[in-house]
Structure formats: structure tokens, C-alpha cells
Amino acid sequence: MIRFFVFILLVLMIMPQTLAQSENARIRQGNRDYNQENFQDAERSFREALEANPQNRKALYNLANALYRQGRYEEASNILDGLSQMDIPDNKRADVYHNLGNANMGLQNIQEGIEAYKNSLRIRPDDNDTRHNLAYALRQLQEQEQQQQDQQDQDDQEGDDEQDQQQDQQPGDDDQQDQEQQQQPRPDQISPQDAERILDALNQREQEVQERIDREERQARPVVPERQW
């Protein structure tokens, strides 16, 4: 009987170590698959590690990264959001917020992405990568707001034009004849010299626009990739 209890005690002592070794082995395998860009295999290994220990922070974090790299931003965001509320060191929490910002940007949740980057910088203010991502997100937000404002202005203008049309009277025969005459093309309105100057101005404008686009593309580089543990 004593030997039986000793055997049970040894099993209970060894089991946690065996499970921990299994967790770590699956995480290492997942990391190898991840580095080889086999993200589905990496996901599988991290999930197997979590079956042994659902609270394994490293497995959760790496699983979120594997999901992110598969374009499954919402799943990655949910995991990272939960992980940010767990008891983890500050430097790890900064990484979590950095990646959470990236996942939100993938979802086009720009405001949420900005807040996540800010949370990361509150912990690690000298992080240049996160500062870059925050600047990128702020530019995206500004462009989005400008597009919304332009659309609103266009809608308002169309509403005003429609109202003006309803108030205008139908043109008479003389007015209609005048309009038709005005719409007839008159080749002699623009001289060849004027046409050439207009063409030169258009070419110059096109070149300036292309230079501006090239400059903005250099400034708005892709978001810095996720952080790894």
C-alpha cells in the first residue's frame, strides 16, 4: 500500500513537468513553422500547446500572430485584447498592444488601432516602430475623415442642385434655341497657341501630381510587422 501511494505521488510530481515539456515542445514547433511561413501548421501547434494549458501566455500571443499572418484579423484582435488584460510583464504588454494595433488596422478599425499604439507607447515611449505605426494610422484617419467630408459636401451640393432645378421654369422656345446655339462647337474659340499652352499646363500638373503620389508612398510605408516572442 505504501509503495502504491509513493507511486501515485511520483506520478503527480512528474505529470506537470511532462505537460510543461509538451507545451514547450509544441510552441517550439509552432515557432519553427511560423518562421518558415507555414502559418496554418504554426496555428495548429500553438493550439495543441493551449490544449495542455489554456493560460499559456506565449502560446496565446504566438497563436494571435499566426492568425494575423493568415489575414484573420478579428480572431487575432480578440486574443490580443484578452491577453492585454492578463498579468504579463510591461515589455510584453507593449508588444501585445503593438500587435493589437496592427490587427485593428487590418480590420480598418483605425481609431482602435491608434488607441492600441498609444497604449503601447505609454509603456515604451521610445519605440520607433510603434511611433511609425501610430503616424501611419493618424494619416489614414485624416484621409478617411477628409473623404467623408468630401462625400458630405458632394451630397449637399447635389441636393442644392436638385432643388434649384425644381424651382427653375422650363425654358421657352427662344431660350432653348439660344442654348442649342451655345452648345454648338466653335473651333475658332481657342487658338493653336492657347491649346498648346493648356496642354503644357496639363502635362505640368500631371507631373506634379505624380511626384506628390510618389512622395506620399515613400512616407506611408506599410505597417511594421507584428512583434514576436
Image (tube, rainbow, N blue to C red):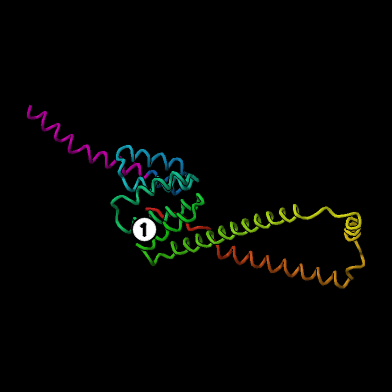
Nearer to us in this view, 68 or 11: 68
In which quarter of the view is residue 123 placed?
A: bottom left
Nearer to us in this view, 221 or 18: 221
Q: Of helix, strand and loop, which one carries label 1?
A: helix
Residue at the spot of label 1 = 94
Decide: few, some or many residues near mark 1? Use Cα within 10 Å; few <14, some 14-19, many ≥20. many
Magenta segment includes 171: no
Residue reaching furthest to the left: 2
**In the image, 164: left or right of 50?**
right
Q: What is the magenta range?
A: 1-28
Label tally: 1
Which residue type does callout 1 highlight?
Ala
Residue reaching furthest to the top: 1
Magenta segment includes 15: yes
Residue 44 rendering spot, x and y as whole percentages: 41, 39
Q: Residue at x 60, y 58 (%)?
A: 147
In which quarter of the view is residue 154 placed?
A: bottom right
Residue 225 rendering spot, x and y as whole percentages: 47, 55
In which quarter of the view is residue 149 placed?
A: bottom right
Residue 152 rendering spot, x and y as whole percentages: 61, 56
Image height of 94 relative to 30, above or below:
below
Quadrant placement of the N terminus: top left
